[in-house]
C-alpha cells in the first residue's frame, strides 16, 4: 500500500520538475527580452540571417520531444484506421490500445521536457520567446494554414487566441518602429492593412495571404532545413507559455 501511494507521487514530481524549470527559465527570458508580445520585429519585417540561424539551432535541440510526440500521434492515427475496417483482429486492437496507453502516459513528461529544452536553449542562445514566435510564424506560414491529415494529439491549431493576440502586438510594435524610422509609405500602408485584417479576424495569422517578398527572400537559403525541422505533432505546443498555479502548471 505504501508503494502504491508513493509511486504516483514520485512520478508526478518527475513530471513537474521539467515544467517548473521551464517556468523559471521563461521568467529569466522575460526579464532579459520582455514578454512574448513585447517583441519588436525589424522595421522591414525581415529576420536577419544570424537570427534565423539561432532559431534553427533551437529547433535542432527539440528533435527528441518531436520524435516522442510524433510516435504517439502515429499510434493514435493507427487506432483511427480500425474504424474503417469491417473485420478487426481483437488481439491487434488490444496491442495497439496498450501501446497507445503507454505512449499517452509518457506524454506529460515529454511536454515538460519540450518546454524545458525550448526555454533553456532560447536563454542560452540569447533569443526571446517573442522573436522565436515571430520567426516561427513567418518561416512556417504556409504550413500553419494546411489542413492536417488524420487525428492529432493536440488539435490542428498552432496559434491559439493568446498567441495570435501577441502576434498582432508584434506587428503594431513593428509599425511604430517603421514610422519612427521614416519608412516608405507603401511599406507603412501594407503593414497597416495587415494589422487591420488581424483586428477584424481574430483567427488570422500575420501575412497569411502572402508573405512579403523581402521576408521570403531572406528565408530562401534556409528553406530545406526549416522544412526538415518542422514537427507537425509538436507544432500546436511550440508557441505556448507555462504558468505555475500552486503545485500545477498551466500551458496556454
Image (spheres, rainbow, N blue to C red):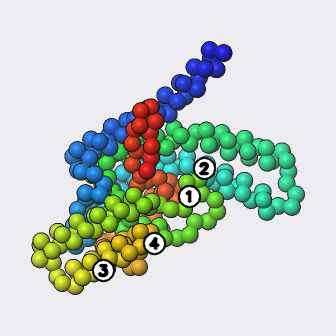
203 or 130: nearer the eye?
203
Q: Nearer the viewer, mark 4 or mark 2?
A: 4
Tally of marks: 4
Residue carrying label 1: 155
- Residue 42 shows in this picture: yes
| Residue at left offset 21%, top offset 79% | 188
Separation of marks 4 and 3 at Cα, in angstroms: 20 Å
Left or right: 79 as drawn, with respect to 235: right
Q: Residue at x 74, y 46 (%)?
A: 96
Image x and y of residue 132, in percent: 33, 57
The disc, 1 or 3, on the residue closer to the chain's N-terminal end is: 1
- Graded by Cα atoms within 10 Å as few (under 14), some (14 to 19) or many (20 or more), the crowding at tag 2 reads some
Which residue appears farthest toward the bottom when viewing the image?
186
Residue 83 picture quarter: bottom right
Per the rendering, the mark at residue 71 is 2
Q: Which residue is mark 3?
A: 193
Neighbours of disc 4 within 10 Å: few (<14), some (14-19), many (20+) = some
Say if mark 4 contacts mark 3, CB within 8 Å.
no
Q: Calculate the distance from the C-alpha at mark 4 to the C-alpha at mark 2.
A: 24 Å
The reply, left or right, for residue 70 in relation to residue 17 is: right
Q: Secondary structure at mark 3?
A: helix
- Which residue occupies 49% across, 70% down? 145
Q: Is residue 6 left or right of residue 178?
A: right
Q: Secondary structure at mark 2?
A: helix
Instruction: Determine which of the numbered discs, if any, sits on residue 142 in the image.
Output: 4
Amino acid at each position: 500500500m505504501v508503494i502504491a501511494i508513493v509511486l504516483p507521487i514520485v512520478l508526478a514530481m518527475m513530471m513537474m520538475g521539467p515544467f517548473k524549470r521551464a517556468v523559471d527559465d521563461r521568467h529569466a527570458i522575460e526579464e532579459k527580452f520582455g514578454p512574448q508580445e513585447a517583441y519588436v520585429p525589424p522595421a522591414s519585417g525581415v529576420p536577419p540571417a544570424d537570427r534565423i540561424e539561432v532559431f534553427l539551432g533551437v529547433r535542432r535541440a527539440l528533435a527528441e520531444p518531436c520524435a516522442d510526440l510524433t510516435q504517439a500521434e502515429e499510434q493514435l492515427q493507427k487506432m483511427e484506421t480500425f474504424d474503417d475496417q469491417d473485420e478487426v483482429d481483437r488481439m491487434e486492437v488490444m496491442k495497439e490500445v496498450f501501446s497507445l496507453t503507454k505512449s499517452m502516459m509518457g506524454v506529460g513528461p515529454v511536454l515538460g521536457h519540450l518546454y524545458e529544452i525550448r526555454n533553456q536553449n532560447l536563454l542560452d542562445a540569447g533569443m526571446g520567446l517573442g522573436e522565436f514566435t515571430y520567426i516561427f510564424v513567418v518561416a512556417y506560414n504556409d504550413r500553419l494554414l494546411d489542413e492536417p491529415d488524420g487525428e492529432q494529439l493536440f488539435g490542428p491549431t498552432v496559434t491559439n487566441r493568446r498567441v495570435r493576440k501577441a502576434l498582432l502586438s508584434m506587428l503594431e510594435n513593428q509599425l511604430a518602429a517603421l514610422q519612427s524610422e521614416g519608412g516608405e509609405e507603401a511599406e507603412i500602408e501594407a503593414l497597416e492593412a495587415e494589422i487591420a485584417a488581424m483586428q477584424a479576424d481574430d483567427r488570422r495569422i500575420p501575412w497569411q495571404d502572402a508573405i512579403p517578398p523581402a521576408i521570403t527572400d531572406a528565408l530562401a537559403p534556409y528553406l530545406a532545413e526549416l522544412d526538415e525541422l518542422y514537427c507537425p505533432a509538436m507544432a500546436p505546443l511550440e508557441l505556448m507559455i507555462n504558468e505555475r498555479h500552486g503545485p500545477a502548471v498551466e500551458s496556454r
